[in-house]
Amino acid sequence: MEAVLMEYNRVRPEDLKTLATIVGPSDVSSEEYDLVTNALDAFPGEPVLPEAVVWPESSLEVLEILRYASERRIPVTVRGGGTGLAGACTPRLGGIVMNMMKMSKILEVRQLDMQVDVEAGVIYDQLNRELEPLGLFFPPDPASGKSCTIGGMIANNASGLKAVRYGATRDYVLALRVVFPVGLDLHLGSRVFKYSIGYDLARMLVGSEGTLGVITEATLKLRTLPRNRKTIAAYFNSIEDGVKCIGRIRLSGIEPAAIEFIDRTHLRLISEWSGLNLPDYECMIILEFHSYSRAGLEEEVADAVSLLREGGAADLIIPKNEEEAERIWEARRGAYPSILKACRSPIIGDIIVPLSRLLDGVNKAYELARKYEVRVGVMGHLGDGNIHANWLTDRRNRDEWERALKANAELTRYAIEVGGALSAEHGVGVEKKEFMREQHHEALEIMRRLKELFDPNNILNPGTML
Amino acid sequence: MEAVLMEYNRVRPEDLKTLATIVGPSDVSSEEYDLVTNALDAFPGEPVLPEAVVWPESSLEVLEILRYASERRIPVTVRGGGTGLAGACTPRLGGIVMNMMKMSKILEVRQLDMQVDVEAGVIYDQLNRELEPLGLFFPPDPASGKSCTIGGMIANNASGLKAVRYGATRDYVLALRVVFPVGLDLHLGSRVFKYSIGYDLARMLVGSEGTLGVITEATLKLRTLPRNRKTIAAYFNSIEDGVKCIGRIRLSGIEPAAIEFIDRTHLRLISEWSGLNLPDYECMIILEFHSYSRAGLEEEVADAVSLLREGGAADLIIPKNEEEAERIWEARRGAYPSILKACRSPIIGDIIVPLSRLLDGVNKAYELARKYEVRVGVMGHLGDGNIHANWLTDRRNRDEWERALKANAELTRYAIEVGGALSAEHGVGVEKKEFMREQHHEALEIMRRLKELFDPNNILNPGTML
């Protein structure tokens, strides 16, 4: 790491002056408050302070910053809402944090086209609030929707609760405006729903975690809001029964918008935190259904309920109204805050396995918890294979923390071995960098050569991902 | 072009011997019959004969062929079913055609995973026949499904009738095995439904038209077969009324599996060719509905029928049974053969525009037909913006042929200007190469540099796409 560090220059006072001429004096800072609040995301890593923070307000400003930093060899780490769970936007080598929050305009909603153009700093929930009166929405539904940015979602291929039916962010990116350190400000892709026009550079940028270029604008495909929704939940006395139901529902042809799994550990934490007083079962499965037709919705729900009953559900909650449904989602939303309440520095896991390995994958997490003597809670978007094994630990307890890290690492390796992936939706960042070779083998070299092509001086998010 | 040609070597007798040691003597040929049948796809270009044809049977053979050809600087053009409409698999500079039809094994269907692994030469319809008993299918539905290969579909990001609901080939590619001329045989992507694991190399290969590497195997996501289907059709006395209905249906929340448009010119050609005796209207719109629930299906159909009536439909066909529905699709399937019957060398157009420009785009085709005094028939997958303006001409009538080419070129430029794309599903190939600069501007240089990274000696499909 030392060798790499030596290649970069630190931000000097004259650099701050130049940055001020580019973005204006109020949009650059080296004050401690700004450095500290731009040092970390939601990954519990060791903080490294940046030396400066800039808030560009246009693609042109981004271009000038990148040109200057590339020439001067100053690291630039791009930051959206700072909600990432893998440390992808943390300035590992200091330098400049480019905070995109001032590029927060919804540029154009084209209702007839079912598209929207946004700047990278637009917040997910804000976008959907603007779209709702038009009957449209942008479906990927990350748990951090209140504060994550569209640019960050694209950079991480974020997804969440609704991916099982609607797909991930990648599936909604039609075109991007991206600024590269080689001095290019390019429009990639096209504002149409499908195309066959050469290499798909726009989608190659999806999931690139700020290492290739800075996404400044995006054109997103939208969907029509479902006219009818229904949520149900089922409790099981056996993890096996619960997980097996998920596979059966997937193959039945029913297409729920969400298929969530929460285990006993999480149910208890949620109960304690929220006061919801959830019953004590091995696991809970939540299903949400979306449909154009009320009658169609009822048929899907009825058939899912039958599958759950046949599959051994010990208790079913079939809400009679929106409020009762809301209480189920309130429990689900309580999962993350309840973990934070229960332990100081949880390690939030994120793997994905093929559907046939779901039960195996969940059991593997428990097995590793026993092996390494750490507490784990398992939940996840199991409908698409995405397991969150959350290790309940405290980094002040150094020994336990190390064991939890080992358990998470072994689970990640397991996911890769069974044909899955080191991350479904949280990304690589700092956290999963060490597994990239096992995931990609020789293809990792190709990625590094791609990075060189776009960012020859390696100024963008150095020390993360690759 | 001369300069480029000089860089390549021709296939000599000793090259044929080496190729025979790689693939076996029965899998290499320089016989005229094989050269002629591997010279063209469905694009009416001037044939250039290859000097040899090889039929590899494994990724290892592909690797050895590419290594040898790269070292010897012999062009290699990858060929699937030869059904492409843009000349993407035609050996513009001679050399070797690598015909993938012997890599035609369905390697593994994993029902519980809802995935299939195939070799590149598997035929689309064959795959879906194998999947049907399991209740699964691979949705992109190209008109050439009877003979196109999965590898070719991936290389062109093929789609078709069902893309409006199910998306294009890109949306189903999870992982690829790709052999690169730099001597790499790589597994890209992962066998799970979503991932955030660095640059998405697998999807970057989708649409690369054989210019970066040879796709030898693919893992595809599958969907459950719809339990209920229904087809309806509507005739209109006005193109405007018909096209406007499409936009209204898209925004209504109804999600048909197909939204097809056929104009009067095509209706007449189909009638003449098929004897179906279709009524004489300005245009026809065909809708197919898929649903888990019969009741849900009926509601969607009823609401679509109301929208069509309110939108001015002059006649509605609501089939009472499968046979009546089949007759509608028989008409649609007759479109392409009826064109071939009506004129010797039609130019099959393929553009895509934002939904708000649908009517404008269709009218533009007619305007250009008048301007250039050529016959045009317009049809397409209008539900997603994909317009096929088909120029009915004969290349023996040199003057008319040139005018048709000009009309098609002007329509392609129009699509790019309104934010659309030079091709929705047929690809760039030889046909649309000239528009790549207008589509991509400076991003075209990035594509060329990517090509250099993977294929430094430019042996793969030279003279096409870029």
Image (cartoon, coloured by chain):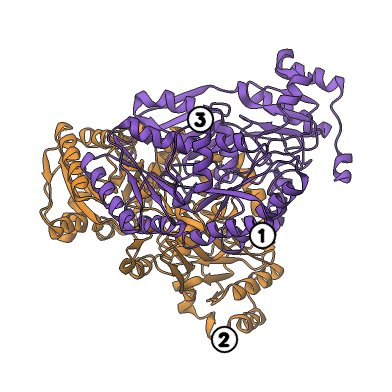
Chain colours: A purple, B orange
Left-right relation of B82 to A308: right
Q: Nearer the viewer, mark 1 or mark 2?
A: 1
Amino acid on which disc 2 is placed: Pro
For the question of whether residue A363 can be seen, the reply is yes
Kind of element beneath mark 3 = helix
Mark 2 surroundings: few (<14), some (14-19) or many (≥20) residues within 10 A: some
* Looking at the image, residue B364 lies above or below residue B274: above
Chain identifier of the residue bearing label 1 in the image = A
Residue B246 lies, in percent from the top left, at 27, 37
- Which element carries disc 2, helix, strand or loop? helix
* Residue drawn 45% across the image and 55% down it: B172
Chain ID of residue with mark 3: A
Contact? badges 1 and 3 (CB < 8 Å): no
Count the marks. Answer: 3
Q: Report the front residue among A10 and A389.
A: A389
Q: How far separated are the C-alphas under marks 2 and 3?
A: 60 Å
Return the residue at label 3.
Answer: A124
Please give the label number shown on residue A371.
1
Name the residue at 49% across, 51% down.
Answer: B428
Tag 1: amino acid: Lys
Q: Are marks 1 and 3 on the same chain?
A: yes
Label annotation for residue B25: 2
Residue A37, given in percent of the width and then of the height, sits at: 71, 25
- Does B297 appear above or below B130? above
Asked whether the beta carbons under mark 2 and mark 3 sit within 8 Å of each other, the answer is no
